[in-house]
């Protein structure tokens, strides 16, 4: 329990290597974009963290439903881990997006669908964590958390749709012919490769961090158990 | 009437009830005694269907909890140390509300009967927040017998009552029990419990540590019995 | 007791609608006695409008474009007061247990509370709207479309709010927690309601407003259904 399993140690190393490789790919391997210049390189990590954050969001909602069904606290731990990691990943995505936006759109922030929804999603996550903090009983905490992720899981897509009915100026990179989308760009094959590689790398990083977080939960439980033993 | 087998209740990693066995025949009046933190309130909440067992079997009047909880609740009357009454409604309105929740026929007649039984007919049109604690407790008992339950659970009903109010409560309790109902009452007041109950169970550290009938103990010996069981 | 004609076995099995109505009636009756919930909501709503007036310093034209927004923000904030208070009453005197002891499906409690919360919100709106009209005299104010949007939006808000307040009231952080939980989830309602309200107030053709109305209806239906399915998990122990 106290030392990391070998697989995890290996994953740590692999994650670091993938991260380094991604850096290299984004900054050196990928070609320079004609219109936007060097700042466009931020795109790869931005998309990767956003996508992986999205997976975390779905994972949290699904784990919540599974908890309500099976009543096994393991699912609750998975939900919390997913939310915490997703929270950070999305935050990174938002920050990178801002860095990209500043020179291109002339502003750090704009209230268009994807950004706004991302901000609301972060609020949902924070609310989730605050909700859990206010409940002592672990079983109740898990139940409330699951209910909230479920409601959030329904609400956030609906939010996205509702804001999207507004016009968007967010670059729709893949597959949109919308005339209102400014700042889109065509992707050279090397760029596509870099993007997918970044997504892959961050997925592995997510799994690694997730594993660490689950171990942290298990250790915390162990401490609780020992505390109770001592008190008796 | 009440059968409990190997009841376990956990809150997270803490186990409050550890394989509790308990049974009550129809018409018995059992006083459930024990130190604070022994699990009396937790146990009573499970019996009243407000809380779910973690493991074990509970059945009341032939219906099992939590599967058939609606059927159990129809036959159950609960008085806790909180009044469960609405301060901004009159005594009459409170009873009418609960009567409608229980879907009672000939409600106004029943409300009259119950008010008379607990000695509050004169105050029926007064707001409950003007009632003394003793009067509120009597009305609470009225609320609990409104639907003519076969089983009654009292959780520390004498809390906060002065001498007069306690004596009035004695009278009401005796009458309620005399009508053939099965009663389980928790109390810290050993002297009172001794005069009312036909059996005394002592709950300690999550199980029933000892049980003795009124007959076998003889009068005035309850306190010694209690100390003996817990001192060990 | 088995000879007793009022014995449990002879009672009708289902009492759902009666229970819902009983809970709603109880809330309304108790509130009309004390009026503390309504007066708090009302005063707060009027204060918010006042604050908006001074902080937004608008000329007539600009004001017209923000009327919908100001009103909905006001209702959203006043609404949390009502939601909090309504549940706190149950929790503080242990009455929530009393409700849970009734031999009726738990969701009846949800619907009963949601209906009374909706009633309180509508009462506040019915009073605030004419006041706003007198103060600012906006155009097209008294159109059925506008009132329809207010109703639909309030329904969505209260559907989610009642469920979340049931959770919030069981936590340590209580009153503070409800707005934090509620507002992120209720954004679609606010967006749609404000846009639809704006549409009706500025006399837009109905075709342009319909997408927002659709969204409101969809949201209301989805969340009432979700709350109904999930309420049990929020009150059991």
Image (cartoon, rainbow, N blue to C red):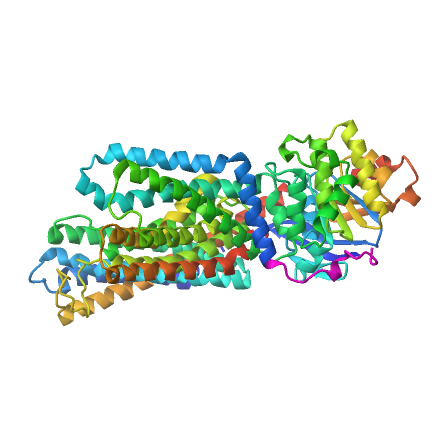
Residue A153 location, quadrant = bottom left
Q: Is residue C4 covered in magenta? A: yes
Q: Residue at x 22, y 62 (%)?
A: A22
Q: Residue at x 25, y 57 (%)?
A: A113
Closer to the camera, B154 or B131? B131
Residue C69 location, quadrant = top left
Closer to the camera, B125 or C58? B125
Q: Which residue is drawn at 46% across and 58% down?
A: C224
Is residue A228 depicted above or below A147 in this figure?
Answer: above
- Residue A181 appears at what percent x and percent y? 15, 62
Closer to the camera, A32 or C66? C66
Residue B59 location, quadrant = bottom right
**Which residue lies most toward the bottom here?**
A189
Q: Is residue B134 covered in magenta? A: no
- Residue B202 appears at what percent x and percent y? 79, 44
Q: Which residue is drawn at 28% across and 63% down?
A: A201
| Magenta stretch, overall SS | loop
Q: Quadrant of the N terminus of chain C?
A: bottom right
């Amino acid at each position: 329990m106290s030392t990391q399993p070998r697989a995890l140690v290996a994953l740590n190393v692999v994650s670091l290597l993938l991260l380094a490789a991604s850096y290299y790919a984004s900054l050196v391997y990928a070609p320079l974009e004609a219109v936007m210049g060097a700042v466009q390189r931020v795109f790869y990590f931005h998309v990767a963290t956003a996508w992986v954050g999205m997976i975390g969001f779905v994972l949290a909602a699904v784990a919540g439903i599974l908890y309500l069904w099976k009543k096994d606290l393991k699912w609750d731990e998975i939900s919390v881990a997913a939310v915490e990691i997703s929270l950070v990943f999305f935050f990174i995505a938002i920050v990178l997006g801002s860095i990209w936006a500043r020179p291109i759109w002339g502003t750090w922030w704009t209230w268009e669908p994807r950004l706004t929804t991302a901000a609301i999603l972060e609020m949902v996550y924070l609310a989730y964590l605050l909700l859990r903090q206010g409940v002592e009983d672990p079983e109740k905490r898990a139940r409330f958390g699951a209910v909230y992720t479920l409601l959030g899981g329904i609400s956030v897509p609906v939010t996205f749709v509702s804001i999207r009915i507004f016009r968007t100026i967010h670059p729709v990179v893949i597959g949109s012919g919308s005339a209102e989308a400014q700042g889109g760009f065509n992707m050279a094959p090397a760029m596509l490769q870099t993007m997918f590689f970044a997504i892959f790398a961050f997925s592995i990083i997510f799994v690694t961090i997730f594993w660490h977080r689950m171990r942290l939960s298990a250790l915390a439980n162990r401490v609780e158990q020992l505390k109770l033993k001592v008190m008796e | 009437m009440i059968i409990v087998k190997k009841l376990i209740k956990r809150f997270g990693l803490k186990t409050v009830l550890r394989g509790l066995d308990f049974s009550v025949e129809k018409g018995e009046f059992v006083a459930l005694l024990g130190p604070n933190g022994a699990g009396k309130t937790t146990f009573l909440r499970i019996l009243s269907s407000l809380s779910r067992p973690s493991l074990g079997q509970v059945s009341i009047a032939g219906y099992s909890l939590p599967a058939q909880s609606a059927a159990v609740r129809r036959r159950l009357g609960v008085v806790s140390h909180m009044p469960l009454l609405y301060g901004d409604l009159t005594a009459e309105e409170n009873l009418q509300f609960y009567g409608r929740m229980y879907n009672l026929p000939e409600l106004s007649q029943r409300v009259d009967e119950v008010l008379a039984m607990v000695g509050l007919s004169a105050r029926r049109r007064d707001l409950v927040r003007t009632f003394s604690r003793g009067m509120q407790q009597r009305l609470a008992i009225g609320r609990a017998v409104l639907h003519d339950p076969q089983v009654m659970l009292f959780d520390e009903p004498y809390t906060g009552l002065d001498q007069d109010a306690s004596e009035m409560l004695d009278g009401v309790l005796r009458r309620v029990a005399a009508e053939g109902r099965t009663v389980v009452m928790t109390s810290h007041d050993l002297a009172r419990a001794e005069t009312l109950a036909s059996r005394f169970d002592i709950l300690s550290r999550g199980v029933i540590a000892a049980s003795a009938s009124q007959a076998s103990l003889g009068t005035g010996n309850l306190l010694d019995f209690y100390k003996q069981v817990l001192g060990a | 007791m088995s000879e007793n004609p009022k014995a449990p076995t002879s009672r009708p099995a289902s009492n759902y609608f009666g229970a819902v109505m009983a809970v709603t009636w109880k809330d309304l009756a108790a509130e009309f006695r004390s009026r503390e919930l309504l007066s708090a909501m009302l005063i707060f709503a009027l204060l918010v409008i006042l604050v908006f007036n001074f902080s937004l310093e608008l000329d007539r034209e600009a004001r017209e474009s923000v009327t919908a927004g100001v009103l909905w923000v006001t209702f959203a904030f006043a609404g949390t007061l009502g939601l909090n208070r309504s549940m706190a009453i149950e929790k503080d005197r242990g009455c929530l247990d009393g409700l849970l002891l009734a031999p009726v499906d738990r969701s009846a409690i949800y619907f009963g509370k949601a209906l009374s919360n909706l009633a309180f919100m509508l009462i506040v709106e019915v009073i605030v709207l004419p006041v706003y009209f007198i103060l600012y005299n906006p155009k097209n104010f008294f159109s059925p479309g506008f009132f329809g949007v207010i109703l639909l939006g309030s329904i969505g808000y209260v559907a989610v709010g009642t469920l979340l307040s049931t959770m919030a009231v069981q936590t340590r952080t209580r009153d503070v927690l409800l707005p934090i939980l509620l507002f992120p989830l209720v954004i679609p309602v606010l967006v749609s309601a404000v846009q639809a309200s704006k549409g009706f107030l500025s006399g837009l053709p109905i075709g342009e407003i319909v997408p927002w109305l659709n969204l409101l209806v969809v949201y209301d239906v989805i969340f009432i259904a979700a709350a109904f399915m999930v309420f049990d998990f929020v009150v059991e122990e």
